[in-house]
Amino acid sequence: MLLGITSVIRDLFPNAILLHANSRQDCLRIIKNKKIGLMISDGTVDERPNLSMIRDLRALQPDIKVMMLVEGVRADHLRSLSRPGEIDVCIRKNAPIERIYEAILSVLAVAEA
């Protein structure tokens, strides 16, 4: 899935700088040192739910947009666990690449408005 997301972003934004974090600690280090426009996140990091990490990220960069890729949990259930404004868009990991493309465009369009 990472390669699919990467190619979608490269198609949309050829000049985008893509960063990849392998762990919660790595993600927080990146966010502390770079301004990020959109974070595309797996539902878990280091086998822990990602919501607490997203809260930490929002504290560091309140304007960051967050797209959560989910598997095995309904997007509306994940939203019910999250606080308002934590997750901008939830999408299933196995969604067609066109749907992921549309979701990225929609969340970035809101950011520019």
Image (cartoon, rainbow, N blue to C red):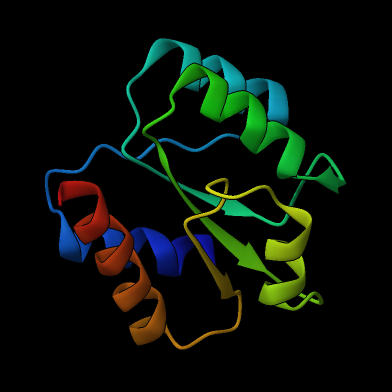
Q: Splitting the image into 4 quarters, where does residue 78 fall?
A: bottom right
Q: Position of residue 69 (x, y in %)?
A: 60, 64
Task: Determine the residue positioned at 31% across, 74% down.
Answer: 101
Q: Splitting the image into 4 quarters, where does residue 68 fall?
A: bottom right
Tell me if residue 1 comes above or below residue 47 in the rendering: below
Most extreme residue toward the front is 84
Q: Position of residue 9 (x, y in %)?
A: 28, 59
Residue 91 in view, yes or no: yes
The mark tally for this picture is 0
Task: Determine the residue positioned at 61% across, 74% down.
Answer: 93
Tell me if residue 5 comes above or below residue 73 in the rendering: above
Task: Determine the residue positioned at 71% across, 52% down.
Answer: 82
Q: Position of residue 89 (x, y in %)?
A: 49, 64
73 with respect to 90 (left or right): right
Look at the image and tell me in which quarter the N terminus lies: bottom right
Q: Position of residue 26 (x, y in %)?
A: 62, 23
Q: Splitting the image into 4 quarters, where does residue 45 fall?
A: top right
50 with respect to 97 (left or right): right
Tell me if residue 7 comes above or below residue 108 in the rendering: below
Most extreme residue toward the top is 33
Most extreme residue toward the right is 47
Residue 23 in view, yes or no: no
